[in-house]
Amino acid sequence: LAKKGKAQDVVLFQQFVALVTSLRNFSTNNLIEEQHLSVCFKALDDDNSESLCEEEFVDMCSVLQTRFQVTKRDSWVKEHLAGTEYGRLLERLMSNGADGPDLGCCPPAWAESKFIGSPFDIMMNTILGLNVVWLIVQSVYDLNNIPEHSWFSAIDMLFSFGYIFEVAIKLCWWSVTEYWTSNDNRFDFITTVILAGAGIAFVCFDASRDVIKFLNLLRLVRLLKALNNIPTYEETVQTISRMVTTCGDVLVMNLLMIYLWSSAGLQLFGGQLFESNPVLKGEDLDYFSSHFEVYNFNDMILGMVTMFFVTITNWTAQVAEVTIALYEHFTFGWYMACGFWLTFYVGSPLIAFNVFTAFSIDVFCKIEEMTDPDSDGAKKSEVETNLERMQSEMAAEGYVLHIEESAELQREKIYKAMFEEEDDDEAGGDGDDGNGEK
């Protein structure tokens, strides 16, 4: 067919569906559900010709590793109150007046949220801050064994039912499916139900106040959500998450080194590192005088803690010396202990951990470059541009297209950017004769 001004082979939608269906038998990374294949096809079709040329088709691998979800944005309550005084009041409460498409409760990075900064958001953040202050006051009372006033329970109940009000208002604004797409909303809903249930049990069934105190720990965890309002904190969490995803294989290599040598250490030194051990009598060991007894091989967990400590400190002479001292010089056990520490030092601190450190630095720099809007690495692909256009079009119809890249795709993008940079550096070096001339 004629496409992009020339005749070339193309893939039609029916052929695309048949191909994706066949690929499901060979790969678990195919995340596209059948009802969203049309979305995937439109994302690949740059010129809206309802066919894919070879240039567009090669982007299929990345799109197939992306999870799509289409939800109805507005709730039944919002739709039925539209145009009424209550509907306008709800809109003033839940909207910040920002321009652009309304992409629901968790919009993508390129779109501005219409909820964050709204009067209701500000009110709930204020309540969250007051709850933090209230928990500090309660902690002061508990730590100093000061008897609590009877009205403390009423304040706890007030906060619990305040969070119920938050969930109810959000469900009046967004549909249940749209509300549930946000992990923050899921966490809020579950903790709110638990805390409200505990409050009702305390009031109606005379539940133990100690149980209520333990359940209030959930509220303390919920307060960590307030940190999401700090942009630097949110960016840091996202960067760490992407680094862990990308560096997962190297992390597993380090964990495997620690696990294997901890198993060997358990057999060689387990249950022997105590000061009254007759074998260590008369030895002047810094291990005991420095109180390093917590680092031992009495079980696998303590052994792994010990080897992790040795790895991050690059070497811990106190632990190595006491383990070697368990065996007489030049005996088989002594050689085994020396070999144990020599091989671990070379394999973990010198190789595995240094590889992880160097690789993590490269990944961090590349992630920063890719997220910098002014850098070349942040340039959007045709597929990303098409998906953003589709999100805007669907938002105008009252639907939200949620797009979530798989961990494998995020890792592949970072690897690709790193290797492309290396290829560019090598190409630049090959074109130079060493005297600055080409």
Image (spheres, rainbow, N blue to C red):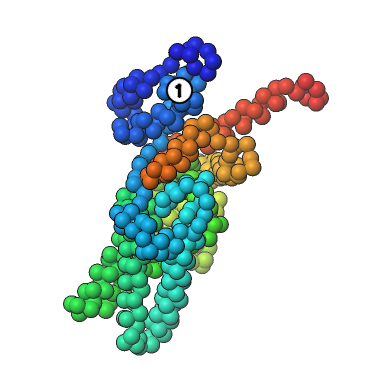
In the displayed structure image, the side of residue 174 where residue 370 appears, left or right: right
Residue at the (34%, 34%) spot, across then down: 36
User: Above or below — where is 88 with respect to 2?
Assistant: below
Quadrant of residue 362 within the rendered picture: top right
Q: Which of 341 and 220 lies nearest the eye of the viewer?
A: 220
Residue at the (43%, 71%) spot, across then down: 127
Q: Secondary structure at mark 1?
A: loop
Residue at the (34%, 46%) spot, across then down: 72
From the image, tell me which residue sits under label 1: 49
Res. 325 in view = no
Q: Image quadrant for the N terminus? A: top left
The mark total stands at 1
User: Above or below — where is 345 with respect to 415?
Assistant: below
**What residue occupies the far top of the structure in this picture?**
7
Q: Image quadrant for the C terminus? A: top right
Q: Which of 256 and 140 lies nearest the eye of the viewer?
A: 140
In the displayed structure image, the side of residue 411 where residue 269 appears, left or right: left
Tag 1: amino acid: Ser
Res. 372 in view = yes
Quadrant of residue 62 within the rendered picture: top left
Residue at the (43%, 80%) spot, across then down: 137
Q: Residues within 10 Å of mark 1 (few under 14, many from 20)?
A: few
In the displayed structure image, the side of residue 17 where residue 9 appears, left or right: right
Residue 174: image location, x then y, percent: 35, 54
Residue 381: image location, x then y, percent: 53, 33
